[in-house]
Amino acid sequence: MHDLHGTAMGDYDNDGDLDLVLTMGGGNGTNPSKALFYTNKNGKLVLNTGDVNIDKGGRGRGAKWSDMDLDGDLDLMLINEASLKHAKPQHFFYKNLGDGTFEYTSVGKGYKIKSHLAR
Ligand SMILES: [Ca+2]
Ligand SMILES: [Ca+2]
């Protein structure tokens, strides 16, 4: 494994064990990399990045889990360094669909983050 920048563990599938995401750098911007996603299957971390639809490459720096839409499951935020061409989006937000997969979404473009203050 090379160019590892960030890690985050969270129980994204609500099965009682922690799953893992690793963010990878992009070779100083020359080789954008997808985050590596590992599902915990009975204590064994199984790489299945493509199977869960984590499909965008970037200059990964950090990953955070948060239930952004307050529907009871963890959504994923991947924080990236700017690309050399300043391509947008810089950061990636993935909504947990609740079936073991994610859907890329863009905050500010149709994806509303609910606030506790709005209740
Ligand atoms: Ca889990
Ligand atoms: Ca959620």
Image (cartoon, rainbow, N blue to C red):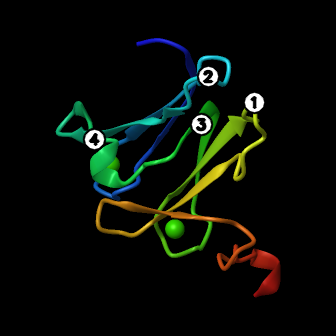
Identify the residue at image location x=40%, y=69%: 97
Q: Which SS class for mark 2?
A: loop
User: Measured along the vertical axis of the image, is residue 3 above or below residue 85?
Assistant: above
Work out whether residue 12 or residue 34 is closer to the camera in this orientation and state it. Answer: 34
Quickly name the residue at label 4.
48
Q: Earlier in the sequence, mark 2 or mark 3?
A: 2
Q: Residues within 10 Å of mark 1 (few under 14, many from 20)?
A: few
Q: Amino acid at mark 2?
A: Thr
Work out whether residue 93 or residue 99 is closer to the camera in this orientation and state it. Answer: 93
Q: Residues within 10 Å of mark 2 (few under 14, many from 20)?
A: few
In the shown orientation, is residue 70 left or right of residue 91? left
Task: State which mark lies toward you, 1 or 4.
Answer: 1
| Tags 2 and 1 touching, CB below 8 Å | yes
Q: Earlier in the sequence, mark 2 or mark 1?
A: 2
Q: Which SS class for mark 1?
A: loop
Residue 58's label in the rendered image is 3
Q: Earlier in the sequence, mark 4 or mark 2?
A: 2
Residue 84's label in the rendered image is 1
Give coordinates of residue 96: x percent, y percent. 44, 64
Task: Report how far apart the C-alphas of labels 4 and 2 lie in the structure.
Answer: 24 Å
Give coordinates of residue 29: x percent, y percent. 66, 25
Q: Which SS class for mark 3?
A: strand
User: Measured along the vertical axis of the image, is residue 64 above or below residue 95?
Assistant: above
Quickly name the residue at label 2.
30
Residue 16 visible in the displayed image: no
User: Measured along the vertical axis of the image, is residue 5 above or below residue 35?
Assistant: above
Q: Amino acid at mark 1?
A: Leu
